[in-house]
Image (spheres, rainbow, N blue to C red):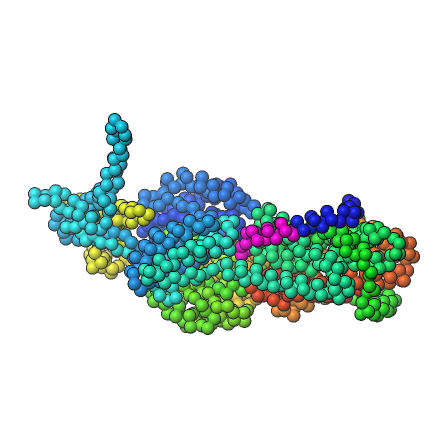
Amino acid sequence: MLALVVRQSVRHPWTVLTAALLLLLIGGLALRSAAYDVFPDFVPPQATIQTEAPGYVPEQVEALVTRPLETVVNGANGVESVRSESIQGLSVITVTFKEGSDPYRARQVVAEALGDAAARLPAGVGTPQLTPLTSSTMDLLKIGFTSQRISPLALRDLVQWTVRPRLLAVPGVARANVFGGAQRRIEIRVRPADLIARNLSISDLSSAIQASAAVRGGGFADTPNQRILVQPDNGAVTAKSLAQSVLTPTNGGSLRLGDVADVVDAPAPQFGDALIMGKPGVLLALSSQYGANTLYTTLAVEKTLQDMRPALAAQGVTLYPALHRPANFIETALAGIRHDLLIGGLLIAFVLIAFMRSLRVALIAFLSIPLSLLAAILVLDHFGQTINTMTLGGLAVALGVVIDDAIVDIENIARRLRLAPPDMPRSAVVEAASVEVRAPVVYATYVLLLTMAPILLLTGLHGAFFRPLALAFALAVTASLLVAVSVTPALAYLLLRNVTHRDEPRFIARLKVGHERLVRRLCAHPRPIALVAALTGIVGSLLFLSLGNELLPAFRERHYVVQVIGPTGASMDWMRRTGARISHDLLALPQVATVEQQMGRAEAGEDTFLPNHSEFHVRLKPVNGAGEEAAQTGIRAVLARYPGIQTEVLTFLGDRIGESLSGETAAVVISIYGADLDTLDRVAAQISRVVGQTPGAADVQVKAPAGTPVLRIRLDHDRMALHGITATDAYDAIEIAFQGHVVAQTSDANRTVDIALALPPSLRQDPEGIGAMLVRAADGTATRLSDIATIREEEGRSTIVHDGGQRRQVVTVNPTRSDISGFVRDASARIAAQILLPPGVYVEYAGAAEGQAAASHQLLLNVAFAAIAMVALLSLTFGGARPAGLILSGAPFALAGGVVAVLLTGGTLSLGALVGFVTLFGIAARNAILLLSHTDHLVETEGAPWSLDTVLRATRERVTPILMTALVTALGLAPLAIDSGQAGREIQGPMAVVILGGLISSTVMSLLLLPVLILRWRHAQR
């Protein structure tokens, strides 16, 4: 089949050339219009359910809201896991579906399961809400607003009701959460003495407020000629108009709301706040839609912001448009990959010209690079894949590989043209030369594709990351094979048919003479050579097993997420004061550009923090890798100056990846399961102490420590009956005294404002004086709360966490050691030796170390199956297990070279480096296939005898393509390896380092030792 393609390509070269030019044009257009993102979607299909339960403490939320919802969700089809968190006033349930599930279908399943459960929730609990479907990276842009001219109320109104709707209208924006400022509500601040004097109840005020805020329709009136719509309108509901609302008519007129209460615009109770550059402000956090183009959406949002900037400046608002901008990482990664591709391409072109001494020959071979890469991009784009750092990394790694087939083809064509008789038709020479190397080129490509199979078959988070890389690499390599059997021979015929071919360069001729002399000597010692190969494999394997492990390296985003948790029960005011000081100290670091702090939570936000939990986003100035490490050290030093807080420092992508692995942001997560919360707290405290003593431990935290102050008010029903007070009377009084009771809402244009009953600030009770609060009975008498209830201060919990329906306590750690797996081994050994777990309590480890172990195990299993398939393919192709063993004999040298490269660059084996080893074995086998198949060709096709001279001739004729393919692959990868660890190359860099190291050692094996093994064992009977 492929031989037919070669012949038709040579006979119709202009048709092939036209198709190639069309591919270049269409691929270039696709590259411009493709969707760009930071990473492929690595979060499995999820649905998050948030249910507001105002006033409920965590124990009430767990029992009355979370458990009923968990029960129905756990039984839904396709559910993989269910995690939940019950905090004050909020239940959050995260449902993860099985890999491969349709995210839209998954959300529909959850929505259907919630239908009946929602109706059975207690009165006053909100309807369960599914949060919007977002991309894996979630964050799109964080925008800050500050002003010294307008009030926090006005600033919040401006952002929430003017800026937010315009940005939500930008295609690709899924959510816009607002932190900070002061959310406006109309408060009816009741004067209790006036209420009692006029014998009015809270329900009287509620009825009057609801009547004043009500909107009614008037219908229509028909005349003989037209229909007139009737619109009753009592005007805008404002604090002033509500104060004039009539409560009851009196002899002297009417009693109005303003006679018994002060009606004012006031800030609502805060669940969250924000500091922008250490100053009070409003933070707008945008999230991207699932499948959205992060780069284009960011640019569209920034254009909208730019249009709004003059209006904001006119009102005295200062705009910080990029407190967190993930698109920066995309742009940096794209620029870095483009740089690597350019430098690698130039180096490859230099090698081609130096070896072939012909610009035409070099051009024919070089053209396979853009054709192969653009063909891969076209396929990826057609199937809806984003162009992200992983797909680009796969193409960058493939840069030096995709040209190998063309090099083998064009080198053989050029050599045959140089040796062909003058009267022989050029088309016949090109056709025969191309067909001659067709088989080894195809077999080598098949082997390379088989080495990609283990990566393509990976599942979970590691599969989501590396499948696009492997797919891009495999598509490019497949395209390169098609180019080598079609475009390369067609162009060779067009450009080389009338050219006088020069002899090969003198340095290559001298190299071949010296190489042949050395191989001839080595051929006298086949058994020691085989022993060296075996020992190399053993030593390489032992060194490989001794390497440290990490799942993914730290990403060079120039952006850090700093979690700061204050003392249990700390107030929002305490967090503001502490946050302002921390922000000031962080901004003093020379590497820091901007700092924003978000405290607590926003309504329907992804982070459901308590008031004592805040998150700083620290954006760095343009710095290199050393600058980022210095910044991280400086950030940790700043946080160390603040006792009494727990901290965690991560990159944003590290934060998201960790959360995807275990539900927590930390690199190492230790989960303690059991039924009794006190027991879980005690064990968690012991584990955190032991883990903190393990070398390399940092950011050790207990997720939900006990100790939150709680004021327990236990109503006494007997005493309530004596005073004629109902539970509703008491609950209303307590709610109004502290958070206010929302009785109605008013809408004005595009905004909605709550109307709440509350006490004046001077009368709002502090916890110590709550017993003196008056509760009014139905007959108008007032009784102190302490007379009908027992009031006691206790310690409670801020958070109750479930996983799979079981209560869970969590200890998190961010090791400073790169060998995270080694840290987990040390920590687990210490825990097992020093802590005796109570009955019914057990511990599980999750996070990066477990992810690395699972990924490594799955990858090795996949490699074993691929190796069996590879041996079977080679055995069938070359006639037995003996030649298959010879082809794979370079694997020990490839392994050893890769291990040495890892040791020289830090000694830590990331998943990217593991993928590099898998890829390396396919590249190493290619050279062995070229040499062995050419030896067979000389014997079986050209009739040469099986002898030392024949093997030396085959080696001499394949030195140039083997050296060229090794050099172009190495030089194509060199920029990526040199820039390993820089932004956008954190995963691909270690891959390139491994492939580069193994390529050097395996090439030496192919050129020096493999001929010896072929001579001795290819045909053992001779």
Residue 512: x %, y % from top left: 83, 67
User: How many marks overall?
Assistant: 0
Q: Which residue is drawn at 27% across and 28% down?
A: 225
The image quadrant of residue 411 is bottom right
- Above or below for 279 versus 369: below
Residue 480: x %, y % from top left: 70, 53
Q: In this view, does 18 lie to the left or right of 103?
A: right
Q: Which residue is drawn at 30% across and 57% down?
A: 154
Q: In this view, does 442 lie to the left or right of 246?
A: right
- Range drawn in magenta: 23-39
User: Could you say which is closer to the camera, residue 874 or residue 346?
Assistant: 346
Q: Which residue is drawn at 53% across and 60% down?
A: 331
- Above or below for 871 versus 342: above
* Outermost residue toward the left in this view: 252
User: Could you say which is closer to the camera, residue 351 or residue 1022?
Assistant: 351
Q: In which quarter of the image is the C terminus?
A: bottom right
Q: Quick check: is 124 in the magenta stretch?
A: no
Is residue 888 visible in the rendered image? The answer is no
* Outermost residue toward the front in this view: 498
* Outermost residue toward the top in this view: 224
- Above or below for 216 versus 677: above
Q: Is residue 535 left or right of residue 172?
A: right
Dominant secondary-structure state across the stretch colored magenta:
helix
Is residue 337 visible in the rendered image? The answer is yes
Residue 206: x %, y % from top left: 22, 45
Q: In which quarter of the image is the N terminus?
A: top right
Q: Quick check: is 24 in the magenta stretch?
A: yes
Residue 439: x %, y % from top left: 79, 51
Q: Residue at x 25, y 31 (%)?
A: 221
